[in-house]
Image (cartoon, rainbow, N blue to C red):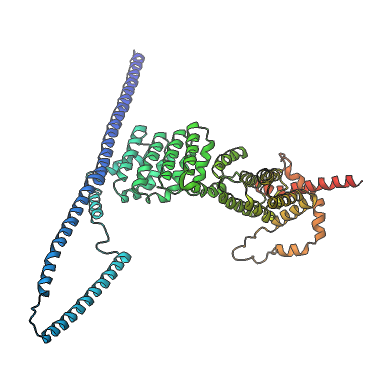
Amino acid sequence: MDFENAGNDSSQNQLSQQQQHHHHSQTNSNSALMLVRFLNCLGKAAVGIVYYVDCTVKDELFRRKEAKQSSATNKKSQQKPRKSAKKRTKRKTPDEDDENQSTSINDTTTTSSNQTFNTTTNQTIDDEQDDEMCQVFGGAEAEDPVDNEISLYIQSLCEKNSLLMQYKNILEQILLHPNDYREEALQLSATICLCKFMLLSVELCETHAKMLFDLLKNSTFESVRVAIMVLMNDFYLKYPLAFAAYSNDVYGCLRDRSDNVRLAALKTISNLILKEMVKPKGQISEIALCIIDKHPQIATLATSFFSELAKRQHGEALFNILPDIFSNLVGGGLDKERELNEEDFKCIMEFLFKYVSKEKQTESLSEKLCQRFHLADNNPRLWRDLAYIMSKLTYNERALKGLLDHYNYYADKLVEDAVYESFLMIVNNAKKLLGNKPDLKVVLDELSIRIDQARSSSGILVAVQQAQQKTKQQPKIPRAGGAKKGKQTAPSRSKTKAAQSDDDDDDGSKENSDDDENDFKQPTKKEAKIPTTTRSKRGAAVTARKKAAVVASDSDEDDD
């Protein structure tokens, strides 16, 4: 019996605990629901105040200001005819006055007129000086009284003891402790309420900006991140300078893991750029990456954005941001986490170059790309991307002459097959379009001859030597404090270069052939893996050496 009673007691205790837990969870859900409704009411009250201030109060203050100005102008217009009547009565003189009296009157009138002229000129000079001082340093009338009254009214609403600001601590408590308040609806309503509070004044917007962007980056709820991005339109419209320091975080939402967040971010950013609320800068490449997004709605929205941007300013709006896109996408290395393959890069460039058709645009772009070739390091992927961009341009006579003038900038890169094919495509397309002109035909023939010479044995050897010089002439980073005592300092690179002779350069290609071939081998388990940076720098020189050896062997066989 005791065992039965004990079993009954334990079962009853378990039932009571389950009931208490269910009751506790039910009360928590009910309290969270009540808090959500209360926060929604607070947010609507804040938006109502913003609408009341921007529409009703501001319109009323402007109406009063215009009424004062109109009454002042009416008073001035009524005072002018009275003064003119007095002057007319003073001018009346009797006809029977003596000559002495007339001369005295004339003297007095001339002196009085001179005095009045001097006083008026002095007053005008003083007024002009006062206006200049007010423009430079600001004056009592420089500030708009309407804005002053509105700012004072908003300050009274945003004080700590005001009705709305008493509940601001509740919002901060909910948003700063998401582990204690785990309901998604509660987090969403608190975020929206905070955003509506921030619309009241610039001070509130600036003080809570960091909290808002922390939520945008770290919130686990998709709906919270979407709501913040949608409300960014209102923030930039009302306070455009408050979020200037967080532009990278705004563009960073285009890389969000959620499709809905990326879509909301793209809609917001494209809307702000097209309305000229935000100037497109280096982050515009993030929108270009949306062209190849897996989500079809995001891809179509990105393409429509660039097509609309191409219509602005006669195509100059899109052309001005192309260098920023190239600098971030060329080479495939976006950042440490992301890489852009060549097929996606070509897809983006092929779409963007549909809107580049003016001759001045092609001339400036070809010149910039040639200079970029000259500054490029030993990265074959970078060479291929630059050459592909140049092949998408439609060249005129001036642009082709520029290619011939800047031949030395890209001559050593023609050892890469894709680069060589891209430049051949440029020459062939130019011959089809502009081959009838005799002057241009000479330029095209010379350019094609030089391109073919770069693929010969002598041209490849020159490319090898230039690649070796670039690898040797890397800038040396000086150590702070100099060399320590008791340690031997390494000889400088200039001394080692002076010690080397030309014969060593010729023999080095044969002696180090085995070492260069090891760069392209797959690393085994025992061998250490070579870093990608060193392989990219040495890859161009190795390919050039191999091609030089093949060409030399072919020439020897022909001689035999």
52 left or right, relative to 394 = left
Q: Quadrant of residue 130?
A: bottom left
Residue 176 visible to an observer of this rendering: no
Q: How many marks?
A: 0
Find residue 39 and report its horizontal and vertical position in percent. Answer: 28, 37
Find residue 44 and report its horizontal and vertical position in percent. Answer: 27, 38
Q: Quadrant of residue 344?
A: top right
Observer-nearest of 465 and 94: 94
Quadrant where the N terminus sits is top left
246 left or right, relative to 382 = left
Observer-nearest of 75 and 82: 82
Residue at x-position 25% and y-position 71%: 124
Work out whether 532 lies above or below 466: above
Residue at x-position 28% and y-position 35%: 40
Observer-nearest of 415 and 393: 393
Find residue 184 and report its horizontal and vertical position in percent. Answer: 37, 33
Residue at x-position 61% and y-position 51%: 366
Residue 448 visible to an observer of this rendering: yes
457 left or right, relative to 559 = left
Work out whether 57 lies above or below 256: below
Observer-nearest of 419 and 527: 419
